[in-house]
Amino acid sequence: MQDASPKMAATADMMWLGFFFLMRPGEYTAPRRAESTPFRATDTRIWIGSRSLNWHTAPPADLAAATFCALEFTNQKNGVRGEVVGHGTTSSPTANPVRAIERRLLALRANGAQPNTPLCAYRSTPAEPWSYVTSADITALLRAACVLVPDSGILPTEISAQSLRAAGAMALLCRFVDANIIQLLGRWKSDTMLRYLHLQAQPVMSAFAQTMLAGGNYSLIPGPAGMPLPTTPTIV
């Protein structure tokens, strides 16, 4: 990451934020419609323990020690204005929402960003105009990564920036996080979330057959008087 171009560094960081925050492309890449704005520097929240840090003035060492981050929703789709969704740090220095926000804030600060500068903005020097990570940039990065993992069962043509929202939800499901929690994190207001979740995922399905085998050994409650007691089904 240290040797990556400003564009590649920004694209990779926004990819991880899209994954962890279950975001739609318009929430973390250059917007296509005026009514939606991607998250900005001022929408970030970052803490060391319970101590809140100022994104613009906190020393780099403090940002590097941050343990929790959050994004505040303003006009993003399905977000409640003023709602804050947060994540803690992970064991990975790269696949880590706190570190991704830290890197974005430091890059923006180094290039003279204003509070309303989108997190997906990048430039090499303060003299250059801002460029922005697009959904096409995210898609290209994901497809390049997919080529490097041919055993994933996913074809590069099947993945796009929109896939990160489903991928984040599936990652939670594979760890058996409650569906209601997934729905809250993804800001789904209906059961349309279920369209994002795939039963092909091995961690989800691997133990169900044994569970069904054990659960199949049951007796039914007797019916009205005179009816024979149902027999216990036999699972072969």
Image (spheres, rainbow, N blue to C red):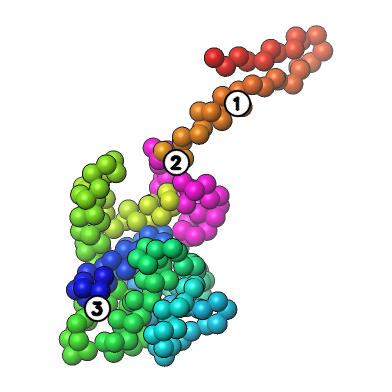
- The stretch drawn in magenta includes residue 200: yes
> Image point 43% across, 51% down: which residue?
171
**Which image quarter is the N terminus in?**
bottom left
- Earlier in the chain: of badge 3 and badge 2, it is 3
Are there few (<14), some (14-19), or many (20+) residues within 10 Å of tag 3?
many
Q: Nearer the viewer, residue 120 or 205?
A: 205
The answer to whether residue 138 shows anywhere in this view is yes
Q: Is residue 100 left or right of residue 65?
A: left
Residue 122 - label? 3
210 up-or-down from 43: above or below: above
**Which of the two labelled residues, at mark 1 and mark 3, occupies the earlier sequence position?**
3
Q: What quarter of the picture does the C terminus occupy?
A: top right
Residue occupied by mark 2: 203
Q: Mark 2 packing: few (<14 Cα in 10 Å), some, or many (20+)?
A: some
Determine the secondary structure under disc 1: helix
**Label 1 vs label 3: CA separation?**
55 Å
Residue bearing mark 1 = 214
Q: Secondary structure at mark 3?
A: strand
* Rendered location of residue 182, percent (x, y): 50, 54
